[in-house]
């Protein structure tokens, strides 16, 4: 009979393989666009590159340790290793929340009509993308610094002392003091603000698309539309990304809360939650690759080499 650990191991392995390959490919493609076709480079690419890096960090720090455990590599990480892995995981997860929110807000500004109140911001917004990323890094690093103190490697003799536990690490119960209150308040406020911004920008985009669909009968034949077809396609992709993010994020959160407040330590529920938490980093590059028309136009073989290759193949056919 196949054990549950083997099933979890295979599931995490497939998820990490798809996610790491997809994000790596997407990162290479954006680099190729930046150097081979700089005229097609968009400010949005910088946001997507940072999202890709955050996705890979999330998969490496949460998926890889689960794979190692499920395939029999126990006690690989000591306390210091668990603290570092958990801290990076929490920062990358928080950074993913911020970047997805920034992505939806940026797209909402881009597709806004030129006669709207967002017209001035539309011109200036690309200049402040790096400033936003610096702010995201600093705030997430400060908010989750308490994780370093609370997390430690699982040992067989101290399982009952943990408030939250996975196969690899445990989180000790929070003490009721000002530092704990500040940590919980900061974490809750952080997620609330960025989810609210995501909801507002997504609603704005949906209303704009609805208004646009009412104005035109056929989107391809309308030359007076304020929103072009590529922008509509990009907006639909980002709305789908935001929907996937919110779905998987809250499934992961519900599993985490259940494990944290259950009487017994339900490690398997936490593992299922970790798997759903990795679904967005694994699936988002596939959505982006499939929706970006520039990627299909990339040619990795130079034109001269392509011509020689074509002549050579024609010669083989004629022969």
Image (spheres, rainbow, N blue to C red):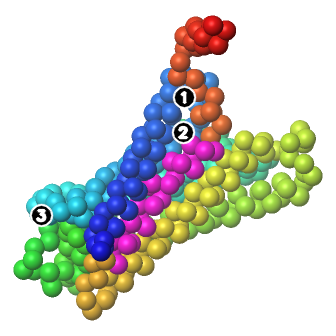
The quadrant of the image that shows the N terminus is: bottom left
State the residue in front, 15 or 159: 15
Q: Secondary structure at mark 3?
A: loop
Task: Give how far apart the Cα atoms at labels 2 and 3 are.
Answer: 40 Å
Task: Give how far apart the Cα atoms at labels 2 and 1 are.
Answer: 9 Å
Mark 2 closeness class: few <14, some 14–19, many ≥20 residues within 10 Å: some
- Is 276 within the magenta? yes
Label ID, residue 45: 2
Number of marks drawn: 3
Please tell me whether mark 2 or mark 3 is closer to you in this view. Answer: 3
The x and y percentages for residue 94 are 39, 60
Q: Which residue is mark 3?
A: 75
The x and y percentages for residue 187 are 37, 70
Instruction: Relative to 280, say whether 193 is above or below.
Output: below
Q: Main secondary structure of the magenta part?
A: helix
Label ID, residue 33: 1
């Amino acid at each position: 009979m196949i054990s549950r650990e083997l099933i979890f191991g295979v599931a995490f392995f497939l998820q990490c393989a798809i996610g790491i390959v997809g994000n790596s490919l997407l990162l290479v493609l954006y680099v190729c666009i930046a150097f081979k076709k700089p005229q097609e480079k968009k400010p949005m690419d910088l946001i997507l590159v940072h999202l890709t890096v955050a996705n890979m960090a999330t998969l490496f720090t949460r998926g890889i340790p689960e794979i190692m455990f499920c395939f029999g590599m126990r006690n690989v990480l000591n306390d210091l290793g668990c603290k570092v892995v958990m801290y990076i995981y929490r920062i990358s997860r928080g950074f993913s929340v911020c970047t997805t929110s920034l992505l939806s807000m940026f797209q909402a500004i881009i597709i806004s009509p030129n006669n709207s109140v967002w017209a001035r911001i539309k011109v200036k917004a690309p200049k402040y993308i790096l400033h936003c990323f610096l702010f995201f890094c600093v705030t997430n690093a400060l908010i989750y610094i308490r994780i370093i103190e609370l997390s430690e490697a699982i040992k067989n003799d101290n399982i009952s002392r943990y408030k939250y536990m996975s196969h690899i690490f445990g989180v000790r119960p929070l003490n009721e003091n000002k530092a704990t209150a500040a940590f919980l308040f900061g974490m809750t406020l952080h997620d609330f603000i960025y989810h609210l911004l995501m909801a507002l920008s997504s609603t704005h985009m949906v209303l704009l698309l609805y208004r646009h669909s009412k104005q035109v009968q056929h989107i391809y034949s309308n030359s007076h539309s304020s929103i072009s077809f590529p922008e509509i396609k990009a907006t639909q992709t980002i709305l789908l990304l935001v929907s996937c993010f919110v779905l998987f994020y809250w499934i992961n959160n519900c599993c985490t809360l259940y494990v944290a407040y259950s009487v017994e330590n339900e490690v398997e529920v936490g593992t299922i939650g970790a798997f759903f938490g990795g679904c967005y980093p694994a699936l988002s590059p596939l959505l982006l690759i499939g929706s970006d028309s520039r990627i299909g136009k990339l040619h990795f073989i130079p034109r001269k080499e392509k011509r020689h290759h074509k002549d050579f193949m024609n010669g083989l056919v004629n022969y």
